[in-house]
Image: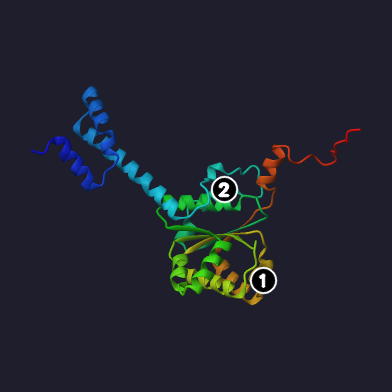
Amino acid sequence: MIGLQERLEDAFHQFGWTRIPEVLHHHAEEASKHNISYLEFLDKLLQEELAAKWDRYIRTRTRLANLPFHKTLDQFDFRFQPSIDERRIRDLATLRFIEHQENLIFLGPPGVGKTHLAVALALEAIKQRYTVYFTTAHDLVQTLQQADQNHTIKQKIRMYTKPRLLIIDEIGYRKMDEPAAHFFFQIISERYETGSIILTSNKSYGSWGEIFGDSILATAILDRLLHHSTTINIKGESYRIKEKKKAGFFRPEGHEEHPKE
């Protein structure tokens, strides 16, 4: 005859429960010690399992989103970047722009926190059960070029059009050749009014003709991106330079070391 322990373990396995088996005996002892009711005991077990399931969901979705790091809005130093309206960013974190299929574009020089903000909003989106995918513009272009050579371009473009939120980081750091620019345009076109994009760039919109090697194509891309969008211009010092200054790698202006005689 199967014992109670074996029956429980079999039931846990069939339900796919992983946390309850770990905490069952602890909560059973607590229930006995403090005379906890059956319903409260059951509630404690189920809440532990739900919390563990949610944690697994977040970790899995974060991994599938291909995020380069894990940074939240609470870790962003808004005091260091006064050009950013914190209330505006917090409002964007409500994710209404995703629900309305709108885009969000961060413009600014390197190191001012564009990618940090994009990743932080991506993490908020994952918590709200939106599908998210992150890529740099360089990796996007390389992936599409390789897919074109392997005759799998349609499948790859579908990969970039499927998520509710697509993040394309570092537009403008490298120029795109003609095929890459047209693939990029196709992704933007297919996501137009169907899915949201967060895009970061170190170039102003007036310079996008140089990025795509074609001012007409750049205008067509911007037309679709900006129709339903919010642009955040960040002006400030690089966080990386700030940290180097703190570490003493940059000397104050006018300071010179006197050579030893």
Q: Determine crowd level at label 1: few under 14, some 14-19, many 20+ residues with C-alpha closer than 10 A.
A: some
Q: Earlier in the sequence, mark 2 or mark 1?
A: 2
Mark 1 lies on residue: 209
Q: Residue at x 22, y 43 (%)?
A: 12
Circle 1: residue type: Gly
As drawn, the residue found furthest toward the left would be: 1
Q: Which part of the image, by quadrant, shows the N terminus? A: top left
Q: Which part of the image, by quadrant, shows the C terminus? A: top right
Colouring method of the image: rainbow
With respect to residue 165, does 227 lie above or below? below
Q: Determine crowd level at label 2: few under 14, some 14-19, many 20+ residues with C-alpha closer than 10 A.
A: few
Q: Quadrant of residue 253?
A: top right
What distance separates the C-alpha of mark 2 from that of mark 1? 33 Å
As drawn, the residue found furthest toward the bottom would be: 216
Mark 2 lies on residue: 87
Residue closer to the observer: 34 or 201: 201
Circle 2: residue type: Arg
Residue closer to the observer: 93 or 106: 106
Q: Is residue 96 left or right of residue 54?
A: right
Q: Is residue 119 left or right of residue 80?
A: left
Q: Quadrant of residue 9?
A: top left
Determine the secondary structure under disc 2: helix
Residue 119 drawn at (x, y percent): 52, 51
Q: Residue at x 27, y 38 (%)?
A: 20
Residue 152 drawn at (x, y percent): 45, 72
